[in-house]
Amino acid sequence: MTTGSTSIDLTNEQKELRLQYERLKIEFSELFALKNEMLSHEAPLLTSLYLELIGRKLYEVYCLSVELSKLKQRMTLLQAYVNRNQIPEITVVDKKIETQFAEYQKKIEDEAQRLAAAKEYLKGSFLSAEETKELKGIYYTIVKRLHPDINPDLTEDQKELFVKAQAAYDLLDINTLQIILISLDIGKKEDSEEYNLAEKVKKLAENVSVLTNQIDALNREFPYVLREKLSDEAWIKAEQEDADKQLETYKTEIEKYKQYVILLEEWKPA
């Protein structure tokens, strides 16, 4: 009989739990990395592309729609003076229009800033396909080793290291991620305690389900729903042409109402 052995014979159930746990760790790491990629990198890129290709024209459409609304309201205010047989007080009308449309003006200014930010973002330097692959690979490994949901017994230093890895990933900082990966204990001991493995499997499976649902929900939202469309030149052209038609319609209406407003502003009682 062999004595002094430290090995532990595992039951079939324990072996299956270990296999299940390892599979879930891989699945969770992949899903977590995917979700973070979507939120940190894909969302700003897709949003910036949309704003630059489509949003800029829609911004012009919105500006003209506000201008037309201002003219219509101005005409209403001026007409009220005419109806009372009074000379229109232009400064009073100007003040009322400014007050009534302050919120619209704020939205126009905010959107202008978004468009400017999108333009600057697209001017920035992006990682090559090879660098992007390396970034994702390193980050995936770090997630598997340091994410609290996979590794509930992390030290405070390890938790802080994971936060640093998150920040480095968001900043596309491959060098820092490489340093963090090297600093990890590659000889990490496997957890030999089996008594809580079933609970770990259950919790990790729940987290995998939550992540899957969150990613599915994101894929149904802006800007992710535009992934394929933003690389479809025919769709982009159709959207731009539709916006151009709206612009022409608004320009025609604006010119018409400008003439009405001029007549009312120059009106004097008989």
Image (spheres, rainbow, N blue to C red):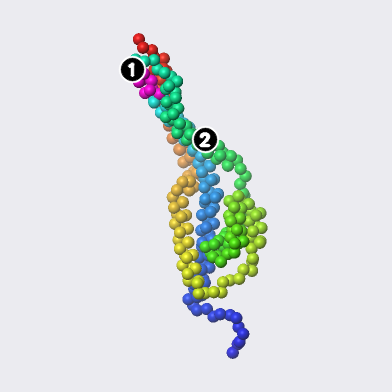
Q: Residue at x 52, y 45 (%)?
A: 46
Magenta residues (range): 74-82
- Screen quadrant of the C terminus: top left
User: What amino acid does circle 2 point to?
Assistant: Ala
User: Of the numbered discs in the image, which one, if any, rests on residue 84?
Assistant: 1
Q: Position of residue 224 (x, y in %)?
A: 48, 48
Q: Secondary structure at mark 1?
A: loop
Q: Secondary structure at mark 2?
A: helix
Q: Residue at x 58, y 80 (%)?
A: 7
- Residues under labels 1 and 2: Cα distance? 40 Å
- Screen quadrant of the N terminus: bottom right
Residue at far left of view: 83
Mark 1 or 2: the one toward you: 1
Q: Indicate the quadrant where residue 76 lies.
A: top left
Q: Position of residue 13 (x, y in %)?
A: 48, 76
Q: Which residue is mark 2?
A: 112
- Whether 76 is among the magenta residues is yes
Q: Position of residue 132 (x, y in %)?
A: 60, 52
Q: Report the magenta stretch's main SS.
A: helix
Q: Residue at x 44, y 50 (%)?
A: 220
| Number of numbered discs on residues | 2
Residue at far bottom of view: 1
The residue lying toward the viewer, choosing from 229 and 250, is 250
Horizontal side of 154 relative to 60 (left or right) equals right
User: What amino acid does circle 1 point to?
Assistant: Arg
- Whether 29 is among the magenta residues is no
Q: Are marks 1 and 2 in contact (CB under 8 Å)?
A: no
Q: Is residue 117 above or below residue 93?
A: below
Horizontal side of 255 relative to 6 (left or right) equals left
The residue lying toward the viewer, choosing from 241 and 207, is 207
